[in-house]
Amino acid sequence: MSATPSAPFLRRVTPGGWAALAWLAGMLFTALQRTRLPGQESAEVFPGVVFLRWDGIVMLVVATGLALRGSALLTRRPTAALVYLLAAAIVACTPLGVMAIPFAQYLSVDVALYVIAATGPPREANRALRRSLGVLAGYLAVRLLAGWNISTAVELAVALTAVVAWLLGRSERQTQAHAEQTRVRVAEQAVTTERLRIAREMHDTVAHSIGIVALQAGAARRVIATQPEAARQALAEIETASRETLAGLRRMVGALRTADPEAEAEEPPEEAPTTTGRTTADIGRTAAATGRTETSAEVRGLPEMPGLAALDRLAELTGNAGVRVAVRRVGAPCPLPPDIDLSAFRIVQESVTNVVRHSGADSCTVTVDHRDPEVLAVAVEDRGPVPGHARVSPGPGSGYGLTGMRERVAVLHGEFTAGPRPGGGFRVSARLPLPTGATTR
C-alpha cells in the first residue's frame, strides 16, 4: 500500500502537537454539542448558565492556555505537562454545567498518558495514571461533598479511556524494548559469527604453514652438518612458508582495519628484515625504480583469495615438507561461487595440515568430485602412519581444525564427516551444495 499524502506531515507532528490538537478538537466538539446545528430543533447538550457569559469564556480561554502550555512541555517535562493538562480539564468543566469531566476535555490527557507510558520509565508512567484517575475521582468527590449531582457512568467511561491510552503506551514501550533487545542480540550474533570466521581463517592460514615450517626446520637441523645443500633447500621452504603466512596475516589485518578511519593516520609498523635481506622499504624502492609492484600474491605464491585452483601449489608445498599429496579431480571442473571455492580449499588445506602434523603418514590423497552439478564433494584421506612412525593424536580439545571445518560446512548447509578409515588411516569428507544461479568467479 502506498502512503497517503498526509503521512509525511503526520510523522512530523510532535507528541506535544498531538496533545494540543486533541485539546482543540475537544473544545470544538464541546462547542458543537452546545450549539443548535442545521437540522436540529435544539442543541444536543444544555449550554449551561455561564457558558456564553464573559466569565465562562474567560475560563475556557484560561483552560486553553493551560492545555497549550502543557502540550509544549510534554516532551521535555512530561510530569509537569500532565499537571497542566489536568488543570485545564478541571478549569474547562466549570462553565459547562456538567456532572462529570467529559471525555472531550480528557482527550489531551489521554495523549499525554500514552506518551508518558511509551517513553518514560515505568514508575513515572504508573504515577501519571494514578494522578489522572485520582483527578476524575476527586472531581466527583467534590461535587458529592457540595451536594451536587454526579454522573458516575460518564466518569467511568472517561477513566476507562485513560486506562486504554496508558496500556497502549506501555505496549509501545515494550515493543520498542523488545526490538532493541533483538537488535542487540543480532549485533552480538553478527560479531560472534565474524569472530569465528576470522578465527577459522587465522587457524587455516597459520596452522598449515607453521606445520610445514616445523617439519622443514627439523629436517634442516638433522642434515645441516652432513648435507648442507639439503639444509639450504629446507631453509628456502621455511622462508616460502613464512612469507605465505605473513602475507596472509597482513591481508586479514588489512581487511579488518579497512573500516577504521584512524588506520591510515597511524604510523607504519617497524620494517623487519626478511631472510633475503630485503625490507619492505627495499621492495618499495625496487617497485618505484622498475614501475612494477610486488603484490602479496606474488610474495605468497597463492592467489589473493585461494580456491581449489591452488590445490597444486598446496600439494607442492606439502610435498617439499615430506608428505606427498596426490590431487585427484573427478568430473569436469566448473566455476564455483567464491565462498564455496574458498571454503572447499580451506577444508582441504586444514585436512592436509592434520596429515602432516598428526598422522605420521608419508602421503595422502585429495579428491575433488564435480560430477554432481548440485553438490561439490571433497575428501582427504591417508593410509595411516608409516612403519616406525606412530600417529600423533592432538587429544580432545587441543585444536580447532575439525571444529572449524565443521563450522564452515554448516554455514553452507552442507555435510561433513571425519573419522578413521576401515583399512587404517583417517578420512575427512565434505559435501557442499551448489546454489542455483549463484555468482561465480
Image (cartoon, grey):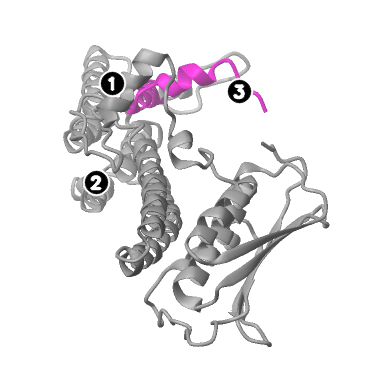
Secondary structure beneath disc 2? helix
Secondary structure of residue under mark 3: loop
Label 1 sits on what residue type? Val
Q: Nearer the viewer, residue 166 or 227?
A: 227
Which amino acid, by three-letter code, is at mark 2? Answer: Ala
The reply, left or right, for residue 228 in relation to residue 316 is left
| Horizontal and vertical percent position of residue 302 | 52, 42
Marks 3 & 1, CB-CB < 8 Å contact: no
Q: Secondary structure at mark 1?
A: loop
Q: Is residue 289 left or right of residue 321?
A: left
Q: Is residue 42 magenta?
A: no
Mark pair 3, 2: CA separation: 34 Å
Instruction: Measure the alpha-carbon separation of dots 3 and 1.
Output: 46 Å
Dots 3 and 2: beta carbons under 8 Å? no
**What residue does disc 3 label?**
3
- Residue 119, relative to residue 224: is it above or below? above
- Quarter occupied by the C terminus: top right
Query: Closer to the camera: disc 3 or disc 2?
Result: 3
- Measure the alpha-carbon separation of dots 2 and 1: 31 Å
Nearer the viewer's eye, disc 2 or disc 1? 2
Pointers 2 and 1 in contact (CB under 8 A)?
Answer: no
Q: Position of residue 237 (x, y in %)?
A: 42, 52
Q: Measuring 39% from the left and 55% from the top, which residue is drawn there? A: 229
Q: Earlier in the sequence, mark 2 or mark 1?
A: 1
**Magenta segment:** 1-28
Side of 417 where 95 appears, left or right: left
Res 294 quadrant in image: top left
Q: Amino acid at mark 3?
A: Ala
Q: Toward the viewer: 263 or 62?
A: 263
The disc placed on residue 50 is 1
Residue at mark 2: 128
